[in-house]
Amino acid sequence: MKPTNIQDPEYFHKVVDCQYACPAHTPVPEYIRLIAEGRYTEAYMINWDSNVFPGVLGRTCDRPCEPACRRGRIDEEPVAICRLKRVAADNRDDVIPYMPQGPFPPNGKKVALIGGGPASLTVARDLAPLGYEVHLFDEQKLGGGFMRSQIPAFRLPEHVLNDEVNYILRLGIHTQFEHYVESLKDVLEKDYDAVFVGTGAPRGRDLPDLPGRQEGDANIHIGINWLGSVAFEHTTNIGKRVIVLGGGNTAMDCCRTARRLGGEDVKVIVRSPFASMKASPWEKEDAQHEDIPIIDNHVPRSFVVATDEEWSVVSDQWLAGEPIPDEAKLRVDENPHSAIRNPQLRGMTFEKVEAVYDENGKRSLVPTGEPEVFFPADDVLIAVGQENSFPWIERTVGVDFDKWEMPVVDKTTFQSTNPRVFFGGDAAFGPENVITAVAHGHQAAVSIDLFCNGKNLLTERLHPMTNLISQKMGIHEWAYDSAVDEYDRLVVPQADKTVTLRDRKKEVELGFDPLAGYKEAERCLNCDVQTVFEAPKCIECDACVDICPTACITFTTDGDESDLRSRTKVPALNISQDIYVADGLKTGRVMVKDEDVCLHCGLCAERCPTAAWDMQKFWYNVTKAGEVKYNVVQITRNESAV
Amino acid sequence: MTYVRSTFRHPALPKNDLGYTVDYYEGSLSTLCAGCGHDSINAAIVEACWQMNIEPHKVAKLSGIGCSSKSPAYFLSNSHGFNSVHGRMPSVATGANLANRDLIYFGVSGDGDTASIGMGQFVHVVRRNLNMVYLVMNNGCYGLTKGQDSATADAGSKSKAGSVNLFEAIDLASLAIELGATFVGQSFSGDKDQLIPLMKAAMSHKGFAFLNVISPCVTFNNNAGSTKSYDYVREHVEITGTMDFVPMMREITANYEAGDVSDITMHDGSEIRLHKLQKDWDPTNRRSAMNAVQNAKDKSEILTGLLYIDESSQDLHELINTSDIALNSLPQSLLTPGSDALAKLNASLR
Ligand SMILES: Cc1cc2nc3c(=O)[nH]c(=O)nc-3n(C[C@H](O)[C@H](O)[C@H](O)COP(=O)(O)OP(=O)(O)OC[C@H]3O[C@@H](n4cnc5c(N)ncnc54)[C@H](O)[C@@H]3O)c2cc1C
Ligand SMILES: Cc1ncc(C[n+]2csc(CCOP(=O)(O)OP(=O)(O)O)c2C)c(N)n1
Ligand code: SF4
Ligand code: SF4
Ligand code: SF4
Ligand SMILES: [Mg+2]
């Protein structure tokens, strides 16, 4: 097989599983080591450079890095990467001195950012220091987008968000809050050199066709609108019995918020089986911990809306959970007089289903045939998904939309079919999460900067900044802590629920204290410290093969990839992980290293008599617009050396 | 600074018939020099025992003194072990074996431990056909005492300091065949594909199984001009044939071209399937085996693989007609029959 080209920065990048999986490619192991050393400010700044909202993300990130984390393939659970980020944020000193300091000499270019969520704020942060005049529009009265209006304060305290939004706004951003942009055409007619659309996916799905929807409207709420109204304190209470429809993270935030606003009997009712719900496992756990049952395999059939008289006839049976006879039609649509007699939402009926999988594994929810069941409710929150909607973008301004009414956006440059208009965040390709919005923002900013300088958006994009440095200090000594700590993942402590349920703003998670942060940081395997092989030095003594705890290394005769994978010491079956192949050995064999479960312990390099293996730290950082460097690590290191 | 070997293992490590993964057969972390051939042999022992489904407590590891003799610490932590005096492993092995014939005796020695100080004990344990594996990790020098020439260093071989050895080498494999060893193999630490089946066959053999394994000393004898360096050995290895060891009651799955293949059935029903590469060599014929080794030597080749095997021999227990039952399993009444029995015995000798 063709030997591995380790000069290609993407090869070693892929070995750093967490960083590779992070949409913004945050250099995770580097900041984890800094946390272990107690250098929180530097750890914070490495994050800030990459993901802009370390304090927010350290509490709320969707953490695609954790399922990818190598530790999870070797140990029971991955490193608590996300919550370590919070340790850096919680313990940082004043970071403002390490951030770009305005005012910046203007470059004469002006950009409009529509929407004030993480995507737009990232573009603002990347472009302002380059001298762009940045105008940011948002319909809300404060910046942050969904981070403010949707993510509840018990998961993300307001001051954490305010700090990080302000780090950006203080760069001299011209904010136009409480300004809903009605027309892209109007914006384009102004003298902006580029326009960025970061308006998110602001429309919550409804269930308009369910019987009783209209009649019960006063007590039926669209989840994201309701959360927004709670966040901005327009809504301060809810009925005692609440049903939340849906199985995603929005449903989890709705039910937990309802518990804090007076909901005593709050239930989540979801169509799909529990295991295949969209919500992250930890969100489900947190909801259940707050005494919120999750009832799966139930499809909503109707909202039951009835007057007091109507209700008094059946309520005893229905509330007792007796099967609902077909003749007991209490649905208001079939009861024309009820509307005038001031009907009330009483609850909902559901059909029970079970998941059936066909031979291709495709799921369908098949009714079990049991009678419908009734659940009482004073209020219902509908959290069954979110959509994009661009009523304010005229279809005549050169921005093309596809058949799903989504803008046509380039996946690399984030440019739309109108070269002056860029998209990012949930507005670009549908609802995702904060870290994805940030990653889009960085790339859109790179594109806008190239565009405003008349450069090619694809060919003149800069490669990531990479570096590879030997960590060798002595025979058994490395510049990183190579020993593998083997204890289990630490649990993040939570505040007592008797306290948190009383106060919507009381943060539930307490975060790791510095000692726990240190311990958890030590679980990291330093996957960025790469095993680098030099075949001409190797005498094929097998020492590395024998010492490797996880059987990564094999010397064997060459073959094609699948053949080699079958002949490694333990077959290399995880094809999502590369094998590292080197030729040029005296015997004509090849060295094959399966990257899959390498512990980066450095023993191969310690055992090698000829230093054919070396442990080298790989640095990979996504290049941001105009190559502004916020990487203060160097600065502070030099300072402490003086 | 660490040098701690993680206990994490590959999550997909296969289990043997006893339900153990290979790490159950490992030893403590080696303190030998990085790149030492002995470590490779240790890894081969671990692998061979795992593959053979041996219960570690059924093995006794025995050794003398030397880097090689330290090795038993680095494999089979769950087995019995006795690290004896320099060159005296054979007598300890003999005593242990006579007391408990139910264990697998795995002796590890060095070329110094065997061919110099231990020569006297070595030749006698061979001729007695003690049921054991006797493995010499042969590096042509006294590794532990900083690399002096040993008795197996070839005449003309150059040391690291540049001095040339004047004396003829003792060829341990020829000597073992000559003295009546009933299983003799030769191998190279850098060739686990050959070494592992050879070890498995040696452990299945009833009688004295001798393995002379060239094992470069990476620190004191891996220089240009040494005939025990990695490079030299790789260039001069010549193999008798490839072999596959098939434990008893297993189906033979290895595929070789017909014609060159011969099967040797061992006393326990296991088979050695041999794919011969040497002409005029019959591994069951002592003289033919001697010739093959000599012929290779004349051509400056190191002949490796199975050299000689005699499956019809009687081991020491059979020769001197000992108890069939290990002494620790004999009932008290048989083990110490009392003064009457002693008086009777004495009377019979008067
Ligand atoms: C309930 C809920 C919980 C969530 N929890 C998490 C979480 O824990 N972790 C996570 O990573 N992600 C979470 N998300 C998703 C995350 O909030 C979004 O993916 C992310 O905020 C998208 O960022 P954005 O910059 O694209 O847009 P948004 O954050 O949606 O910001 C868009 C902003 O634009 C404004 N806007 C829209 N149209 C106009 C207009 N025409 N004129 C002016 N302003 C306009 C909107 O009011 C909004 O403020 C959650 C989402 C929801 C609904
Ligand atoms: C009775 C006695 N004499 C001498 C020594 C010193 N000594 C220790 S190891 C050794 C030679 C070991 O050589 P070898 O058996 O080839 O082992 P290697 O270290 O090369 O593997 C000697 C002479 C000793 N320990 N005991
Ligand atoms: S072990 Fe550390 S470096 Fe490796 S993937 Fe997990 S967090 Fe990243
Ligand atoms: S660093 Fe080397 S010895 Fe350690 S697990 Fe990886 S390949 Fe094996
Ligand atoms: S330890 Fe070094 S010299 Fe020995 S096989 Fe491995 S890489 Fe080659
Ligand atoms: Mg020696």
Image (tube, coloured by chain):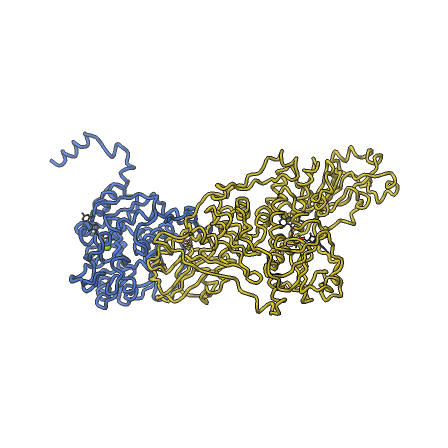
Judging depth in this view, the residue of B224 and A532 nearest the camera is A532
Q: Is residue A101 above or below residue A282?
A: below
Determine whether, in the image, residue A314 is placed left or right of residue B92.
Answer: right
Which one of the lettered chains is coloured blue?
B
Q: Is residue B227 left or right of residue A386?
A: left
Check the rendered structure and report the hue given to chain A: yellow
The image quadrant where one finds the N terminus of chain A is bottom left
Q: Position of residue A193 (x, y in %)?
A: 67, 65
Task: Pick the residue in front: B159 or B258.
Answer: B159
Residue B37 locus on image (x, y percent): 30, 56
B317 relative position to A529: left or right: left
Q: Position of residue B324 (x, y in %)?
A: 27, 42
Along the line of sight, the residue nearer the viewer: A66 or A510: A510
Picture mark count: 0
Which of the 4 image quadrants contains residue B317? top left
Q: Give above or below for A110 relative to A205.
A: below
Q: Is residue B160 visible?
A: yes
Residue A605: horizontal and vertical position, in percent? Answer: 38, 56
User: Which residue shows up at 40% across the image and 64% down it?
Assistant: A590
